[in-house]
Each structure stands twice: as structure tokens, then as C-alpha cells.
Image (tube, rainbow, N blue to C red):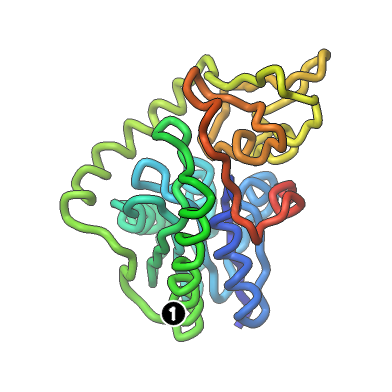
Amino acid sequence: MRTIIYWFSGTGNSFHVAKSLQDNLDDVELIPVTKALNGDIEIAPKTGLVFPVYAWGPPVAVSKLIERLPSNKPDYLFAAVTYGTLPGTTIAITRKMLKNRGLQLNAGFSVRMVKNYPPFGGAPKEQKQRKINSAAETGIEKIVAGVREGKCGDLSKSNFFMSFVGHLVYPIFKAGLSKQKNSKFYADDKCTSCGICEKVCPVRNVQLADGGRPIWGNQCEQCFACFHWCPENAVQYGKKTSNQFRYHHPDTKLSDMTLN
């Protein structure tokens, strides 16, 4: 059965899940969410959404994709989310968004991977990163098996309290992004003007100024790809990130992140 997987990823965690699905299933096409938003959006017989949890909901770019999905119903529609703490209400919110498009989410999966959100302390030390990624492979294998077998239901890990909080937090998160006027991003003196931050930004929110230094616009998705993929650790966010550990999934290449 032909499968299309729309993916969104900043550090490569979710891309790794999408790529694992492609490598272990037949006839799978991977399409970056932000690339799809600039072209035609298609529903295949089996269609999947793979993305990280942001404030216990989907990234704004994913919500925009859902709003534009065709209403023709696939045989099997699934979502697989990556999270650092808990998935919260992500599957429930995604299901509701799809329902508003006349689509039914057949299955929701989740897998814990390395958390990396700079405002909340960023990534852990490399040794812990390796430990979490190793454990995540078992979870990814379960997702692959679940999609292959056509399992249904909410197979993600959540609880009542987090689900309740998520329904409050996620709308605030989305509203905050829409009102964003000034960025806390900047490049420090380690910046070599390599342009990687510009290339990995999925929504083209980073541009190199005339002096070669990056500048950030007002369309940030909070994926922090620019922060984590900078080879010199020169991208900062506010005043407390210079000593944070950077992270991107070890099996995800820079070229994978520049496909958007």
C-alpha cells in the first residue's frame, strides 16, 4: 500500500522516526511539512504525520498542514510524535484537528527521545543522549510494527492530568507565536557566517545580513534547528544558553534537514 509521511523536525528526532518507517515499510514517500505547505498536499491510501511535541500539541506548521489536507479519507491515517517529557494532549489535539477536516485518526503513537528545548535547559550531556536514543529504538520498532499491522487507537503515553494541562497550555503557546515580534536569537562572536542556521530553518525565518551574521524574523516555529545545528555553538537564545549542550540525532544528516 502506498504511504505518504509528512514530517516536521528541528533536531532530527522526528525525521529519524519517519526515515525508520520508510526503511522498514514498502512504498513510502517522505515529504517535509513545510515543503508540502508550499505545494500540493495529497492523501495516500496510508498517510502519516510524524512530528515533535510542542507545548503538548503539534507544531504550528503541522496544524497548518492539517487545515489544508484533502478531505478524501485514506484507508489508514496515523500520527507518530516524539517527546522529551510526556506527549500530553498531542494525539487528542491532532485527532480533533483532523476531525474538523472530516478525517479520522486511526492510530496515534509516541516515543520518548532526547529533550532539547533551550528555554527549559536544553539537551542533557552526551552520555545521557546516547542512553535515551538507544532506548528509543525499541519504541520506534513498535511504531513501525504498529503501522505495518494497521493498529488502531491512541497508543501514546499520557495521563489525565497532563491531558488537562495540555488543553490549557497549547492554545497559549500558539497565541504566543502568532504575536511574536522580537526574537531572543542572536549569534555570538564564534559565528563564522557559514549559513547553516539559514539552511536548516524549515520556515526560512533566518537570513544572513550584509555583514554575514544571521538575523531572525517573526515566523519562528520554536524548532531550534538553528541553535542545535550550528557547528560553532554560536547561536544563542537569551542570556543563559551559551553553556548548554547542543543536540541533533546522530543518524540524521545536515543534508536531511535542508530538504524543506
Q: Is residue 80 above or below residue 3?
A: above
The answer to whether any part of residue 238 appears in the image is: yes
Residue 101: % across, % down: 43, 55
Query: For this rendering, which residue is in front, 200 or 135?
Result: 135
Disc 1 crowd, CA 10 A, few/some/many (<14, 14-19, 20+): some
Q: Answer left or right for 75 relative to 106.
A: right
Q: Which residue is depicted at the point 33% across and 36% down?
A: 171
Q: Which residue is depicted at the point 42% across and 43% down?
A: 54
Residue 177: % across, % down: 45, 28
Q: Is residue 207 above or below residue 121?
A: above
The kind of residue tagged 1 is Gly
Q: Answer left or right for 21 relative to 153.
A: right
Q: Answer left or right for 43 relative to 260.
A: left
Residue 251: % across, % down: 65, 61
Q: Which residue is depicted at the point 56% across and 76% down?
A: 45
Query: For this rendering, which residue is in front, 40 or 30?
Result: 30
Give the position of the N terminus as an image quadrant: bottom right
Name the residue furthest front.
Answer: 127
Please name the residue that numbered disc 1 is placed on: 146
Residue 146 found in image quarter: bottom left
The answer to whether any part of residue 75 appears in the image is: no
Name the residue furthest bottom.
Answer: 149
Residue at disc 1, secondary structure: helix
- The mark total stands at 1
Residue 98: % across, % down: 41, 57
